[in-house]
Image (cartoon, rainbow, N blue to C red):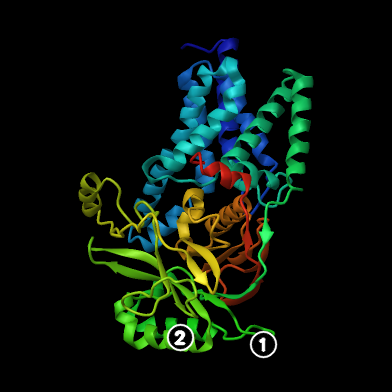
């Protein structure tokens, strides 16, 4: 029987160590994100990945190390998709686990390919941070994109938050990936003095950027009520519960705020109205519109609409009531001041990519899928009196290009969501953190209304001013001051797709 030599044993032990290091480095990576927000763990995680690449003897070994890192990163960070697949997708538990594993494995290919590329750049290790950002960008764009767990989104609430309005999420990712490289160099005593000086300069510069101000508050404040209905996803669409659901939102919508003054705007979450507009036009929407106009206030709500031309559905938001001072024409079916149709749909959740290839497969394994249509790229602003605001729905807030498409005109951002699909998992906290990043980048306050949490007012500095906890019914009454102005990042976006 062949026995390992001392040298071969050492190599085998090192191989096991590299596998363990890769997995742990990836598994701790999500701890930098909400709800943990241990941002300091990012440089450690990436520095360990850099070490794995440096130790790799060829492309195959590097690819394996990056893949294992990715399994830890996304296995811990986004495995909450299994809840949606199993609980609300009509898929049995074993199949939902298999689909989640395949999803995580697909995402793990990105750090794997990055590690293989870094082998080619091993002599030019200063390009490592650029490689990380490149693959973040590719993952956010390919096959509809999945811009989750981007390094830059850890910025809210940190000493480097001031970088966000300067360079945006990918710029902050580059900053953190470079910090990781400098730490890696310091630990292995490579260019020690230069690396230490650069690290100190970057830390001081990032702190100094947070002292800059890019916003100009407008004169008028708005009184807003966010309604978190906390209606169970399994009960929401049942016909017998429709009247109760609508009554819940109506009764929770205050005509006055806590100090007896009128509420300018009440916001209901994504698909808060669980029926198509034509089904509720006469009995609900028209009477509500009349009441709102008599009280000179507004309600902004999520609602599904029929897309008759494309024989699908639209995930939409409508603005009702108030006095239309903006010049926006009323809708055809009611006196709706404005409506917005979701433009970025969730793959497999709201539409099926590659339908000719995948439809037979999904039908064979009996997985239902939705047939939503995309909204038009250019849609009108919403106006609350003379205050322009921009609306996004759910997943769209993860895309800065969509969120900022109506800036700098919009003085306030609103995002409607329903994170009830993902239960009591990390997803709602991560989603809120992404919205905080959009507030930082644009220096605009964000009003976030969700069905089951976390509804919040996010300040223009990315800080949560006030919120309703998860899985609770609540009414969040806030006063928000819209802002105007252009951050350097918004200015850059005019010329580059960042």
User: Where residue 219 appears, x then y in whole percent?
Assistant: 67, 69
Instruction: State left or right for residue 446 relative to residue 212.
Output: left
Please name whichever residue, 399 or 78, is drawn nearer the observer in this view of the structure: 399
Q: Residue at x 29, y 58 (%)?
A: 369
User: Where residue 353 appears, x then y in whole percent?
Assistant: 30, 48
Circle 2: element type? helix
User: Where residue 456 appears, x then y in whole percent?
Assistant: 60, 66
Please name whichever residue, 81 or 273, is drawn nearer the observer in this view of the structure: 273
Circle 1: element type? loop
Q: CA distance from mark 1 to mark 2?
A: 22 Å
Q: Residue at x 40, y 50 (%)?
A: 97
Residue 492, above or below 482: above
What residue is disc 1 on?
A: 260
User: Where residue 341 appears, x then y in whole percent?
Assistant: 38, 63
Instruction: State left or right for residue 259 relative to residue 268.
Output: right
- Would residue 117 be visible to someone looking at this image? yes
Instruction: State left or right for residue 124 relative to residue 371.
Output: right
* Badge count: 2
Q: Residues within 10 Å of mark 1 (few under 14, many from 20)?
A: few
Please name whichever residue, 200 or 44, is drawn nearer the observer in this view of the structure: 200
Residue 25, above or below 255: above
What residue is disc 2 on?
A: 247
Q: Residues within 10 Å of mark 2 (few under 14, many from 20)?
A: few
Which label sits in the foreground, 1 or 2? 1
Say if mark 1 contacts mark 2, CB within 8 Å.
no
- Would residue 17 be visible to someone looking at this image? no
Q: Which mark is residue 158?
A: none
Does label 1 or label 2 sit earlier along the sequence? Answer: 2
Q: Residue at x 38, y 46 (%)?
A: 144
Instruction: State left or right for residue 299 relative to residue 482.
Output: left
Please name whichever residue, 247 or 259, is drawn nearer the observer in this view of the structure: 259
């Amino acid at each position: 029987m062949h026995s390992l030599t001392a040298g071969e044993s050492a190599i085998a032990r090192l191989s096991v160590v590299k596998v363990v290091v890769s997995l742990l480095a990836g598994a701790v990576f999500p701890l930098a994100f909400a709800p943990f927000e241990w941002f300091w763990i990012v440089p450690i995680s990436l520095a360990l990945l850099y070490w794995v690449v440096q130790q790799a003897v060829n492309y195959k070994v590097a690819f394996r190390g990056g893949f294992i890192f990715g399994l830890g990163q996304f296995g811990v960070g986004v495995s909450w998709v299994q809840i949606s697949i199993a609980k609300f997708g009509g898929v049995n538990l074993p199949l939902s686990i298999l689909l989640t594993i395949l999803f995580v494995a697909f995402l793990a290919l990105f750090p794997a390919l990055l590690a293989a590329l870094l082998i080619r750049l091993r002599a030019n290790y200063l390009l490592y941070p650029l490689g990380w950002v490149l693959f973040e960008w590719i993952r956010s764009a390919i096959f509809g994109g999945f811009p989750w767990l981007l390094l830059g989104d850890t910025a809210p609430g940190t000493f480097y938050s001031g970088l966000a309005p300067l360079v945006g999420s990918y710029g902050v990712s580059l900053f953190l990936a470079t910090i990781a490289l400098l730490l890696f160099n310091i630990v292995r005593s490579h260019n020690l003095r230069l690396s230490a000086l650069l690290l100190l300069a970057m830390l001081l510069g990032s702190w100094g950027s947070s002292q800059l101000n890019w916003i100009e508050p407008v004169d008028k404040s708005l009184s807003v009520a966010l309604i978190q209905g906390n209606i169970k996803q399994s009960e929401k669409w049942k016909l017998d519960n429709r009247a109760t659901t609508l009554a819940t939102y109506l009764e929770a919508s205050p005509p006055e705020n806590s100090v007896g003054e009128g509420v300018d705007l009440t916001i209901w979450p994504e698909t808060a109205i669980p029926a198509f507009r034509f089904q509720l036009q006469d009995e609900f929407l028209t009477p509500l519109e009349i009441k709102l106009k008599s009280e000179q206030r507004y309600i902004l709500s999520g609602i599904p609409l029929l897309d008759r031309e494309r024989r699908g559905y639209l995930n939409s938001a409508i603005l009702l009531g108030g006095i239309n001072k903006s010049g926006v024409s009323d809708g055809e079916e009611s006196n709706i001041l404005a409506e917005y149709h979701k433009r970025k749909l969730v793959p497999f959740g709201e539409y099926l990519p590659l339908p000719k290839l995948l439809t037979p497969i999904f039908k064979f394994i009996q997985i239902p899928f939705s047939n939503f249509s995309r909204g038009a790229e250019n849609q009108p602003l919403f106006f609350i009196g003379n205050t322009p605001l921009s609306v996004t729905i759910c997943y769209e807030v993860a895309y800065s290009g969509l969120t900022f498409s109506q800036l700098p005109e919009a003085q306030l951002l609103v995002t409607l969501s329903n994170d009830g699909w993902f239960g009591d998992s990390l997803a709602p906290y991560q989603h809120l953190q992404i919205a905080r990043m959009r507030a930082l980048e644009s220096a605009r306050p964000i009003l976030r209304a969700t069905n089951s949490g976390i509804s919040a007012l996010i300040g223009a500095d990315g800080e949560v001013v006030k919120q309703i906890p998860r899985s609770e019914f609540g009414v969040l009454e806030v006063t928000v001051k819209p802002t105007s102005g252009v951050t350097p990042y918004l200015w850059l976006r005019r010329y580059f797709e960042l």
